[in-house]
């Protein structure tokens, strides 16, 4: 069983930045593909970014490409999401997810473990 704990959410003005963190426990972190998803009120949970286990390739949703950066520190069992140039439409609860699968995991159904979520609010 993998436990995930996110932190770093908050309120920021449009154009600002935030960095989310997610600490994993319960399994060797380097063997996990990690992803970030978000869910805005009244909308489905959507893919944001993923970083593949072992090789570290990264993938992004078109809506965040060029503004967000996903990274991982295997020594700290932590995955990060650096969010720059934030927009009001980025407002959502952001979830960290983990999967033992290898590959470009862009669908939430491919992730087995989820954090509790952290709120990000971008004011205009």
Image: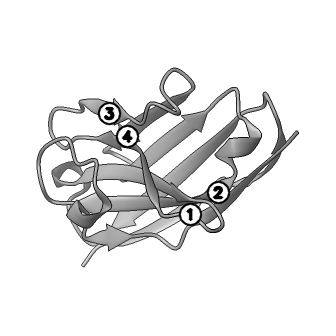
**Label 4 vs label 3, nearer the camera:** 3
Residue identifier under label 1: 43
Work out whether mark 1 precedes mark 4 in sequence or the reverse, and give the earlier one: 1
Residue identifier under label 3: 59
- Taking the image as shown, residue 44 lies to the left or right of residue 58, namely right
Q: Residue at x 45, y 54 (%)?
A: 46
**Label 4 vs label 2, nearer the camera:** 2
Label 2: how many Cα within 10 Å (few below 14, some 14–19, many 20+):
many
Residue lying farthest to the left in this orientation: 102
Work out whether mark 2 precedes mark 1 in sequence or the reverse, and give the earlier one: 1
- What SS does tag 3 mark? strand
The quarter holding residue 86 reads: top right
Residue identifier under label 2: 92
Image: 88 above or below 9:
above
Q: Are marks 2 and 1 in contact (CB under 8 Å)?
A: yes
- Taking the image as shown, residue 44 lies to the left or right of residue 93, namely left
Marks 4 and 3, Cα distance to the nearest angstrom? 13 Å
Image: 74 above or below 98:
above
Q: Position of residue 55 (x, y in %)?
A: 16, 32
- What SS does tag 1 mark? loop
Residue identifier under label 4: 72
């Amino acid at each position: 069983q993998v436990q995930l704990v996110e932190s770093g959410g908050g309120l920021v003005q449009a154009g600002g930045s935030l960095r989310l963190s997610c600490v994993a426990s319960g399994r060797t972190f380097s063997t996990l593909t990690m992803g970030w998803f978000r869910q805005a009120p009244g909308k489905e949970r959507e893919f944001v970014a993923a970083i593949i286990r072992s090789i570290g390739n990264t993938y992004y949703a078109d809506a965040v490409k060029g503004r967000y950066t996903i990274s991982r520190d295997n020594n700290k069992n932590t995955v990060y999401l650096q969010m720059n140039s934030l927009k009001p439409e980025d407002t959502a609860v952001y979830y960290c997810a983990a999967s033992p699968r290898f590959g470009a995991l862009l669908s939430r159904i491919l992730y087995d473990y989820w954090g509790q979520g952290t709120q990000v609010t971008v004011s205009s």
